Image: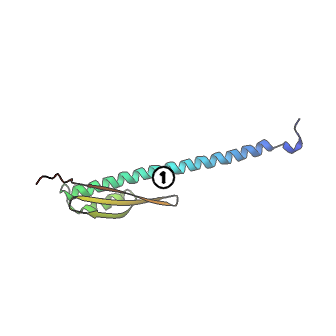
Amino acid sequence: MTTTSERGSASVWMVGISVVLVAMVGAIGAVGQATILDARLQATVDRAALAGADVLIGVVPGTPCEHATELVIIEGFEVLSCSVDSHSVRVEAGASHAGFDWSRRARAGVRESGHE
């Protein structure tokens, strides 16, 4: 036989467990979204560096950083830096999600072969 002080305690436990489960699902969803955004950012920076390298070697007309910057902006990210040396293009872009900011960078260009 149950005493009156224990009546309804299962309801309290179920509400508590439900709140914890909802919070866990929310946290897992936020981490998943951030992971996908990070992968998109890295892929965008890689493609932007390759686009700049195409300009650098003469495949596409224009300026390397202009092409790289345009691609990053079209994808919805922020360009943090773009630099060109004689053989490569370096691009860094950033993203923000749930109050966290991070960046990714990539470099693409022509490798020196050592042959004249």
Q: Quadrant of residue 7?
A: top right
x, y percentage for residue 93? 38, 60
Secondary structure under the numbered disc 1 in the rendered image: helix
**Disc 1 target residue:** 34
Numbered circles on residues, count:
1
Question: Residue shown at 21%/53% (left/top)?
Answer: 111
Q: Which three-letter amino acid code belongs to the residue tagged 1?
A: Ala
- Of residues 31 and 15, the one nearer the viewer is 31
Colour setting: rainbow
- Classify the position of the N terminus by image quarter: top right
x, y percentage for residue 28? 55, 47
x, y percentage for residue 60? 20, 56
Q: Quadrant of residue 79?
A: bottom left
Question: Residue shown at 39%/54% (left/top)?
Answer: 41
- Of residues 104 and 76, the one nearer the viewer is 104
Question: Residue shown at 27%/59% (left/top)?
Answer: 89
Left or right, 59 with reference to 11: left
- Classify the position of the C terminus by image quarter: bottom left
